[in-house]
Image (cartoon, grey):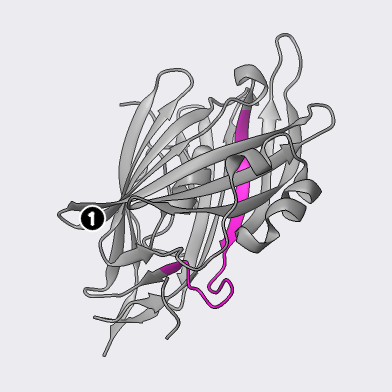
């Protein structure tokens, strides 16, 4: 095998190495119990309505041997009355100890190479470090104006590993009527804590000075990047688990645990 490499509760969707799912899951917010199903889930909390979905492949994983997986995540959020939802500023994730993240051998990209760049320029500078991509939409609400939805390509880049800390960057470039790049930094470290073994912290910058919120996203994390496997997992007991805490622009703090089913083999 190639080297494997409070308020409103966030509803994330993945059991294996959810570092990236949670990082982009600024839009997946709501009160929900942990779930193992793979179908889309819609949750309503007061005025807030959200739909979340995602999964990984393959589902059948060895009990002891780490195996590369491909990760897919998606989510949408809206207020029932059409008002503007709050923005997330920090997401903290404890990932299942049976999932791992590896970046050794994958080319790297720096935050400086991505700042103030559109999608084409970001790819030109860092294509070799690309480990995932998808789409996202931000909603911008200025005072006394109707909220505006602005779509963007979503790019995930490897920032490398130093001193036991892995860094990933998520790049989005919004334009028309707003214009600018948003680069979210994710740091990943080992974190032995009972069922969990990985800690990921995502720092999400403000969009248009705090007027913007991510309202939808979809992201695919590659199974293979130049012969390296960024995410791997094993299935010891039929499930993979993650604990997520989110902090929002309006001061709200929220947390939940999510479980996804897997099939142990061997």
Residue depicted at 63% across the width and 18% down the height: 209
User: Which element is circle 1 on?
Assistant: strand
Q: Residue furthest right?
A: 176
227 vs 101: above or below: below
Q: x%, y% of residue 181?
A: 70, 35
Residue depicted at 62% across the width and 25% down the height: 81
169 vs 84: above or below: below
Q: Quadrant of the C terminus?
A: bottom left
Count the marks: 1
Q: x%, y% of residue 35?
A: 35, 57
Residue depicted at 48% across the width and 21% down the height: 249
Q: Residue furthest left?
A: 194
205 vs 2: above or below: above
Q: x%, y% of residue 236?
A: 22, 75
In the picture provided, is 153 more to the left or to the right than 240?
right
Quick check: is 201 in the magenta stretch? no
Res 237 → quadrant: bottom left
Quick check: is 228 in the magenta stretch? yes
Q: Residues within 10 Å of mark 1 (few under 14, many from 20)?
A: many
In the picture provided, is 174 more to the left or to the right than 19?
right
- Disc 1 designates what residue? 196
Q: x%, y% of residue 224?
A: 55, 74
* Magenta region: 213-231
Q: Quadrant of the N terminus?
A: bottom left
200 vs 95: above or below: above
Q: Residue furthest bottom?
A: 266
107 or 206: which is nearer to us?
A: 107
């Amino acid at each position: 095998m190639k080297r494997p490499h409070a308020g409103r509760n966030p509803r994330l969707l993945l059991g294996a190495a959810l570092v990236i799912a949670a990082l982009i899951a600024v839009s997946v917010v709501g009160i929900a119990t942990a779930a193992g199903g793979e179908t889309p889930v819609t949750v309503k909390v007061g005025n807030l309505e959200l739909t979340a979905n995602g999964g990984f492949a393959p589902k059948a994983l060895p009990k002891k041997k780490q195996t590369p997986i491909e990760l897919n995540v998606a989510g949408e959020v809206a207020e029932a009355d059409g008002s503007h939802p709050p923005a997330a500023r920090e997401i903290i994730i404890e990932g299942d100890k049976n999932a791992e993240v590896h970046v050794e051998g994958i080319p790297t990209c720096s935050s400086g190479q991505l700042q103030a760049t559109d999608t084409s320029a970001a790819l030109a500078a860092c294509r070799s470090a690309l480990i995932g991509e998808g789409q996202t939409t931000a909603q911008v609400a200025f005072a006394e104006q109707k909220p505006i939805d602005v779509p963007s390509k979503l790019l995930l880049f490897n920032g490398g590993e130093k001193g036991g800390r892995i860094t990933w960057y998520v790049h989005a470039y919004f334009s028309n009527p707003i214009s600018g790049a948003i680069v979210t930094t994710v740091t990943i470290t080992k974190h032995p804590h009972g069922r969990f073994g990985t800690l990921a912290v995502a720092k999400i910058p403000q969009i248009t000075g705090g007027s913007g919120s991510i309202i939808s996203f979809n992201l695919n994390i590659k199974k293979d990047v130049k012969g390296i496997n960024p995410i791997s997992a094993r299935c010891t007991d039929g499930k993979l688990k993650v604990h997520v805490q989110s902090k929002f622009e309006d001061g709200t703090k929220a947390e939940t645990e999510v479980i996804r089913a897997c099939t142990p083999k061997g």
